Amino acid sequence: MKKHIEVNISHADLMSVASPGRYVGGETNVIIKNEILNELRTNGYTSAVRVAFGFPDVYEIGMSNLAMQILYKVLNEPEWCSCERAFSPWPDMDKVMRDKNIPLYTLETKSPLNEFDVVCFSIGYEMAYTNVLQMLDLGGVPLKSADRTEEDPIVVCGGPVAYNIEPMADFFDAVFMGEGEEVDLELAQMVKEYKDSGKKDRQELLRKLASIEGVYVPSLYKDEYDLEGHFIALKPIEDGIPTIITKRIIKDLDGIPYPTEPVVPNMSTVHNRAYIELFRGCIRGCRFCQAGYIYRPVREKSAQVLCDNGIAIEKSTGYDELGLLSLSTSDYRGLPELTDGLLKAYEGHHTSLSLPSLRIDNFAMELMNKISSTRKSGITFAPEAGTQRLRDVINKGITEEDILKSVRMIFEGGWSTVKLYFMLGLPTETMDDVKGIADLAIKIEDLYYDIAREKDIKVRRPEITISTSLFIPKPFTAFQWEAQDSIESLGEKQRYLKSLIQRHKSIHYNWHGFETSVWEAVLARGDRRMAPVILDGYKQGCIFDAWDDMFKYETWLQVLADNGLTVDQFIGAIDVDAPLAWDHINIGVTRKFLALERKRAYEETVTPNCREKCAGCGAACFKTGVCYE
């Protein structure tokens, strides 16, 4: 049994690194279970289940993550369970910790990660994989599941990337598929029973964890490949292990705990505001969008519950901005009632509402004016493609007329700042589609000055920003079989687009780097052969890959080659009938439906959204949400 220690990091060490506030804790609304802590200090042991919730990026990003705040509350509710937070230390702090043998610790009680019964990670993007290894390594936890003993924590993860966790299969004892509010506690309860029994057989515990609906235990499965290195199958290694793992969802969002007293960071974060979650899922079915498929079916919270949440959060945090969070906020049916209730409650408080990217076809002047009554800022839209043909290919479901009509409303309402998001490298894309992005931006610029002339008013120059990210073929999308565009082709498209708008001073162009998108695609569609690659990359100093100035593409290419693999093996086209590394996961949406959507894409056929007409995607198997409205 490990002896309980509380990590003591000196003031001098903290002051030697950037942003020492990342490492001190003590925030408003933090939860510390003093009875459990006292038991540890007195006996060196507690019968409670202690969970360290890790976020594999810096504090400022992790504390902007709503999933962490929700599950922090859920896991701290039972008397027999405690949850504490840990984040990736930036390289300067990483060096201090290694040089002085300081283990990675939680912010609540300064306990090393290896003291906990469970170490749980929320992973939102594949580029954070090596940061998981960094945190385990610094926390004194063996990196590989096969190397852990009865004295080590159970290491688990969840989040969007969990739906294809095969590249990280060697490192996790268990993986949550789907939403965690219920399954987290079920796993913690099973760990408590194991702990109370004396922790005698770790492998038997893992078998029991595999019996929980939505829990995948990678070590209980074996991967198979053909002679050419193509993935064939993933099969259980013994009888009684499920061949298919079905995701967990919450059917009644009103009935689950929500953090109305969230931990308030002690420094500025990426999103320095509070949030309420309007609904989960999306009715739209954009064919490139993984989130739009894996979170189906749409389930809404009631406007009254959301309003109550928003009022309570303002009182408990002091935030002056509340974000309305969902995949497509303007599709929330109770939006008028919700915004009216919140704005009335916030009247005179200087608290504003913040909306994420809106769907242009649902944009309403009334809503825009409501938001601007508290704070007026830029408006963001995501057309994704510059031509109608390509918008139909990706099933965006909007027209140029919709776009220009909405932008006209924006300009007439007094806005002059517009941001437009697009993708480059989408399936079937041509240079005409790239030109369409520039054409649309120029039409928006012309429209702004046309309105000024109509009203005979003098206006300042508009700010029109177009941003392009690069298409990444993600699992569980209609485009999961597609090849990723080459770096050479993407570079040509970026240069061409830039040349078309360079004379237009009102139009600014931001673009995403090529190499990170290529590596993200490799990780997104990777299989278990990537685990040694990720481990070797970590050993060669690859961490914080999501940060452009930290990413080491050439190192990754060499590590991949050293392991006998190539980029093209993972980013090339896949036959629609070929086995996929994630076939053992059931998200409700069927593979047959995704293949049909791919066929419709090449036919340039639009599929109606879920509220217009059911397309039979398979999500009705969960017997809830929009499927049963």
Image (cartoon, rainbow, N blue to C red):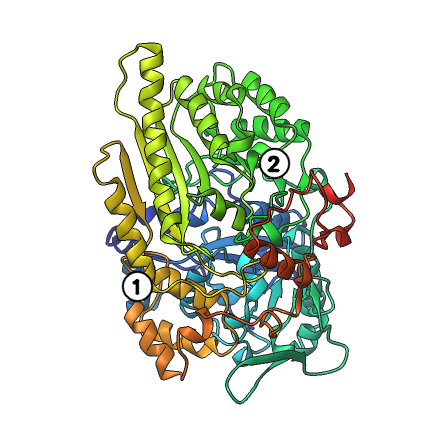
Q: Circle 1 is placed at which residue position?
A: 488
**In this orientation, which residue lies closer to the viewer: 277 or 189?**
277
Most extreme residue toward the top is 456
* Marked residue nearer the N-terminal end (1 or 2): 2
State the mark number for residue 383: none
Mark 1, secondary structure of its residue: helix
Q: Which mark is residue 278?
A: 2
| Quarter that holds the C terminus | top right
- Give the percent coordinates (x, y) of residue 477: 57, 58
Image position of 438 (left or right of 216): left
Determine the image quadrant of residue 99.
Answer: bottom left
Distance between the Cα atoms at labels 1 and 2? 41 Å
In the depicted structure, whether residue 437 falls above or below residue 293: above
**In this rendering, does residue 129 appear at all?**
yes
Q: Is residue 522 above or below residue 203?
A: above
Q: Residue 4 in the image: x percent, y percent?
A: 50, 64
- The label nearer to you, 1 versus 2, is 1
Q: Amino acid at mark 1?
A: Glu
Q: For the point 60% across and 43% down, which residue is it?
A: 284
| Residue depicted at 54% across the width and 32% down the height | 361
Q: Is residue 42 above or below residue 393?
A: below
In this view, the residue in front, 427 or 532, is: 427
Disc 2 packing (10 Å; few <14; some 14–19; many ≥20): many
Of residues 357 and 265, the one drawn nearer to the viewer in this rendering: 357
Q: Secondary structure at mark 2?
A: loop
